[in-house]
Amino acid sequence: MSAEISDPWSKLDEILGLDVAAPVDEGIGALAVYGRCSTEDNQDPETSRGWQFGNARKFVEPLGGRIVAEFFDIGQSRSVPWERRTEGSQLLAALKNPRRGWNALVVGEGTRCWFGNQFSLIAPRFAAYGVDLWVPELGGKFDPRNPSHKMLMSVLGGMSESERQHVQARVRAAMDAQVGNEGRHQGGRAPYGYVVVDGGLHPNPRKAAEGFRLRQLALDESAAEVVRRIFAEYLSGNGDRAIANGLNRDGIPCPSARRPDQNRHRLADGWQGSTVRAILENPRYTGFAFFGRWARQEMLLDPDDVAAGNIVRFRRAKPDRVVRSRQPAHPEIVSVQDFTQTQLMRRAKAAGGLQTARKTERAGRTVKHAYLFRGLIRCAACGRKMEGSPRKHGMYYRCPARTLTPGSPALLTHPPTIYLKEEPLRDALNEWIGGLFDRQNIARTVEQLVQAQPTPRAADDGPARKQLEDAEARLQRFQNAISAGVDPSAVVEGINRAQADRAAAQAELMAVGEPAGLGEAEVYAMIDSLGNVSAALADGQPGRLAQLYRDLRLDLRFDHEREAVDVTASPRVNNACPRGDLNPHAR
């Protein structure tokens, strides 16, 4: 016959071995709960909120605690002080309200709520308003008079900071390896000229099973042509703002206007010099993947108030922090050679200071008068460039003697002012150019250009030729090294020296009669690269004429005594003549 059980639940707990907390007559009472999750490591806010608040309830409910208010920050880094967290600041503001309805705070996990020395800055504020802090890692309520509690909370803050730094280091190391070994696209906005497309299944089986897929860059051909134009114009001598002004005049949409969905932070108000600069300095256009060019840096919000915490700013990373893929990762828009040459030109301009930078911008400025021969005419008496001088009866170019340096030998024979009218020069020059490139005369022009190349003279050019071969070999090695993965900035000085040696050797060989060596096919290609010359001359628009003169690389020397202009044209194929310039002369 079974005995009667007065308390079946207590007996069952005893049989199962459960240790149930004894009910308390007077428990903790009403509490608020605080939690936080960051979206940086792909946490699910709902899941994170559930387990943190669940831990808090398991911790305080056996002690008679009941949660009446919840505060949970989403997307807030633990390094951000409570005053700058959305829910954290509301919690601190609620401390001042005597009718808040709770006199204690519990957290689900201390390392998610406090970072570094944050607890030592927050705890006194809670104590001042009579609010207790319940921390699971302490096993109970924080006692400000207990030195062990203070030490443990200090260690807890250090562990939180260390955990965050270890996670950042592991993630960065993994992303570096993915870029270096696989050339993997790490996300973010695609550079102008590219679009992000599907790259296939994710190599991680677990992520592939969850539906994750790789992303890679593909060409946006119309935008890629604009990028090629920007690099070509820069290599031909135009500056950043001059290129931007030309793109705006041609009505080409800027990146923020073309892709407003990924440029919501931009005004889409046209091309700017800074936009062109960003494109010219982006090495991803070479087809290689780069990662880490910009780094997040945490800086003190107020150096005089360390407790205010840090803010995140993006700064250019040090060269040793930048990672490049070993093999091409996406289609190239600009060759490695052109990109490297562009960076060398930019560094040369930067070394020259503001004065050098201004010269490259003048050609692209909006001016009241159109100067067809801006920077192309020089005075034969002093060798200086003649300046445009508009007059009521026409455009003139002048060279005033008053601007010569005092004591200059040119002052002895230089007239007070030398003038040259633009209209007669333009008509004569256009007639000469039109005759050269007329269909009936093009074959003869090509033949004359080939024959006009210098012929070798009897001279000892052995040392110069050896210097040229050595310089070209060094340049080829540098180019191969860059293609193999060497950072271009690491070989800039060596490339500069090799180019200087090559230029000196070429000049010496030209002085002794080194032939240019261009054949008819190369000369025809050079002429084709100029476009429709006859159409430009017939159109007569100042802009098209000025561009044609620049493409022909005209050099005009005005001799006031003979009242004649010596014209030299030095066109190139795609802005780079293979083995020297061609110099036909006209008068």
Image: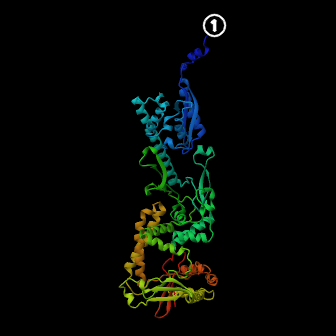
- Colour pattern: rainbow
The number of numbered badges drawn on the structure is: 1
Q: Position of residue 203 (x, y in %)?
A: 58, 48
Q: Nearer the viewer, residue 558 or 292?
A: 558
The quadrant of the image that shows the N terminus is top right
Give the SS element for disc 1: loop
Q: Residues within 10 Å of mark 1 (few under 14, many from 20)?
A: few
Q: Relative to 56, is 504 above or below?
A: below
Pick out the residue farthest to the bottom. Answer: 562
Q: Residue at x 55, y 76 (%)?
A: 367
The answer to whether residue 143 of the structure is visible from this angle is: yes
Q: Position of residue 115 (x, y in %)?
A: 46, 40
Q: Position of residue 68 (x, y in %)?
A: 59, 30
The answer to whether residue 193 of the structure is visible from this angle is: no
| Residue 473 falls in image quadrant | bottom left
Q: Nearer the viewer, residue 154 or 304?
A: 304
Q: Residue at x 60, y 53 (%)?
A: 215
Q: Relative to 412, is 244 above or below?
A: above
Q: Amino acid at mark 1?
A: Ser
Q: Position of residue 210 (x, y in %)?
A: 62, 43
User: To which residue does mark 1 refer?
Assistant: 2
Q: Nearer the viewer, residue 23 or 278?
A: 23
Pick out the residue farthest to the top. Answer: 1
